[in-house]
Image: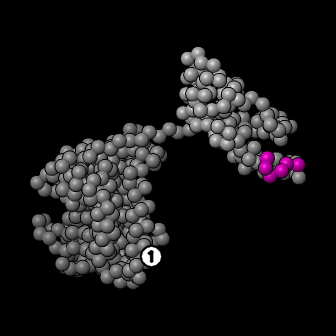
Amino acid sequence: MPGFPINTQQYRLYMKLREAGLTQVSAAVKAGISERTGRRLEQPNRDSPDGHQAPRSWRTRPDPLAGVWDSELLPLLQDNPGLLPKTLWEYLCQRYPDHYDSKVERTLQRRIKAWKLQHGNPLEVMFLQRHEPGQQGISDFTQLKPNGITLKGEAFAHRFYHYRLVYSGWCHVKVICGGESYEALATGLQDAWWRSGGTPREHRTDSLSAAYNNLAEEQTLTQRYAALCRHYHVKASRNNKGVAHENGAVEAAHGHFKRRVAQALLLRGSTDFDALADYQAFVDQVVQVINKACRTRFEEEKPHLRPLPKQRTNDYAEHPVMVSSSSTILFKRITYTVPSQWVGTPLLLLAYDERLELYHSTVHLLTLPRSCMCPRALTGVASITAM
């Protein structure tokens, strides 16, 4: 009808009636449109009401890049497909000043995009993964930057061990005093498994030197990490070297966690803590908020976790040391002072991530904080702490 656009139903009805053999006049009357509209719908290269536009094979204005596309821009793209439209636009403006209007830049962008769809380099393809409950847990280390955390006013160099169940997003974070050592990995990982109440079927990391012998021609598990996985009946796996997105289930969570820590520190009004235990408790509160948000999915995942063994396995390293004539021991290039009556005595040192345990035979003698926990240790000498 005049003044009213036809809709998709009218168009389809008209075309169906015409295919059935009705005349244009009869089909138009039954479809509720005019005869003239019916004739227009049957003309070739006309747009249909259902949004399908016939392809156009002619230009509506002269090509503004006709003089430079084939002769200059296309050879540049063929030699260097990584060139950006902005780079080529600036090249044109410098080579032909005041010749091209700014509107031509959009034409150039479309032209380059169309060329790259046909001739550009192939891109890396990423497939969405479907994660099953209880299938995979993932670990990584990360640092808080900038790190303004202090313990009793002294700078505290540290990093975080971050564990996450991929299906539910449940996580555990431990403050790590040293580097990415096996002790840090074993302590944080076992803490996470015992807090979650079970283990996944697979534990994934990147190429951590604490878990993999990266110097070998073919990367293999270290003996201690392999023993840890056997104790908990967990399969060890790692992402391909240099492919960070394969570790994305925890890499992306690093940023969310550290932003929450930064915001919580702003609310607290201070970055100074009395002791490491206080700082760990603060981090635990941040993690508790994260885990509360994924509580429903974690409850779904818990029945699929494997049961824990009867006890934990070792999360320390053994090192024999000798007390020197200056009443000190040397561990990891850091000197620790011990009582003078031990001079010349061989001791067994158990190195945990946050502390050192000294034994003589089976008798426990002393517990020392590791150097990064004691700021004075950064100068090369750590004081004793009797237990």
Along the horizontal axis of the image, is 312 left or right of 337? left
Magenta stretch encompasses residue 102 = yes
Q: From the viewer's perspective, is residue 264 above or below residue 192?
A: below
Decide if residue 55 is in sight here: no
Could you tell me the amino acid type at mark 1? Gly
Give the total number of marks visible in the rendering.
1
Q: Residue at x 82, y 38 (%)?
A: 61
Q: Extreme top residue here? A: 21
Specify the quadrant that holds the N terminus.
top right
Quarter of the image where one finds residue 82: top right
Q: Which residues are magenta?
A: 99-104
Magenta stretch encompasses residue 128 = no
Residue bearing mark 1? 148
Q: Tell me if mark 1 has few (under 14), some (14-19) or many (20+) residues whose alpha carbon lies within 10 angstroms of its own.
A: few
Q: Residue at x 72, y 50 (%)?
A: 86
Quarter of the image where one finds residue 250: bottom left
Secondary structure under tag 1 reads: loop
Q: From the viewer's perspective, is residue 282 above or below residue 218?
A: below
Q: Main secondary structure of the magenta part?
A: loop
Along the horizontal axis of the image, is 67 left or right of 193? right
Q: From the viewer's perspective, is residue 386 above or below residue 300?
A: below
Q: Residue at x 61, y 23 (%)?
A: 26
Residue 310: x %, y % from top left: 11, 54
Along the horizontal axis of the image, is 346 left or right of 293? left
Decide if residue 146 is in sight here: yes
Residue 237: x %, y % from top left: 32, 43
Specify the quadrant that holds the C terminus.
bottom left
